[in-house]
Amino acid sequence: MDDNKPRIAVLISGAGSNLQALIDATKAGILKAEIALVVSSKGKAYGLERAAAEDIETMVFKNKKYPSPEEAGRDLVAKLRERRIDYIALAGFLSLLPVAVVRAFRNHIVNIHPALLPKYGGKGMYGRHVHEAVLASGDKESGPSVHLVDEIYDNGKVLEQAKVPVRSDDTPDTLAARVLEQEHKLYPRVMQKLINGEYALD
């Protein structure tokens, strides 16, 4: 533990490949921060195993386990505060973040989305669904967007994007693979710039 480094909580729901990219970036000195906590909305997410392999504390958080969304939010804020979390990175976290968390960490929460927002965002637009929509549209390019998180799915200010050409023979899987490769490069870099205060925030 390094008390001088910002502490990041990464929220996941699945395999956690972007979590791994952030972990690797901290080891390489690209991201000068500590991944201090991994929170999953699913108890069997492979990302939890990635975290355990790095001796990172893990936690399963499910909104439905609480009497109300408000109580869920208050409890998660308390747990994040207890662990002195400075920033939150959503990495394939499929639940809508409780309002209390968004308000407590305003401008300190980012998400990575596998399309060029504001297109192909919103409820239900995640994973393969996004790439299918891009291909169906006939768009010539796609790519990840890193954006600030607010109370609405995929709605916050876009900080940076990386463009990926869409090929005529692409399938959702081939497009997803190329976008994911760019996600892994983009996310740690944007996190570091956010920590450095390089973005104009509202």
Image (spheres, rainbow, N blue to C red):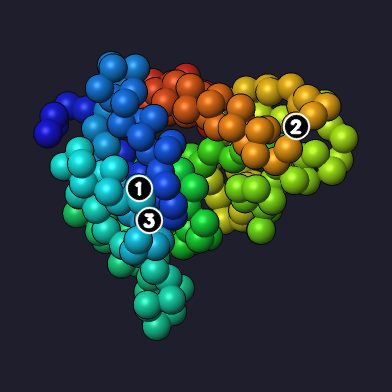
Disc 1 versus disc 2: nearer the observer = 2
Q: CA distance from mark 3 to mark 2?
A: 28 Å
Query: For the residue labelled by badge 2, is the local secondary structure a helix, a strand or a loop?
Result: loop
For the residue pair 24 and 72, the one nearer the viewer reads as 24
x and y percentages locating residue 148 in the rendered image: 54, 39
- In the depicted structure, whether residue 126 falls above or below residue 198: below
Q: Closer to the N terminus: mark 3 or mark 2?
A: 3
x and y percentages locating residue 106 in the rendered image: 45, 45
Q: Image quarter for residue 54? A: top left
Q: Is residue 88 visible?
A: no
Which residue is rendered at x = 55% and y = 24% of the image? Answer: 182
Disc 3 versus disc 2: nearer the observer = 2
> Do tag 3 and tag 1 residues touch (Cβ < 8 Å)?
yes
For the residue pair 28 and 44, the one nearer the viewer reads as 44
Query: For the residue labelled by badge 1, is the local secondary structure a helix, a strand or a loop?
Result: helix
Label 1 sits on what residue type?
Answer: Gly
Horizontal placement of 142 versus 184: left or right?
right
x and y percentages locating residue 60 in the rendered image: 31, 62
x and y percentages locating residue 18 in the rendered image: 43, 36
Return the mark for residue 47.
1
Which residue position holds label 3? 45
Q: Image quarter for residue 25? A: top left
Label 3 sits on what residue type?
Answer: Ala
Which residue is rendered at x = 63% and y = 36% of the image? Answer: 176
Which residue position holds label 2? 170
Label 2 sits on what residue type?
Answer: Asp
Q: CA distance from mark 1 to mark 2?
A: 27 Å
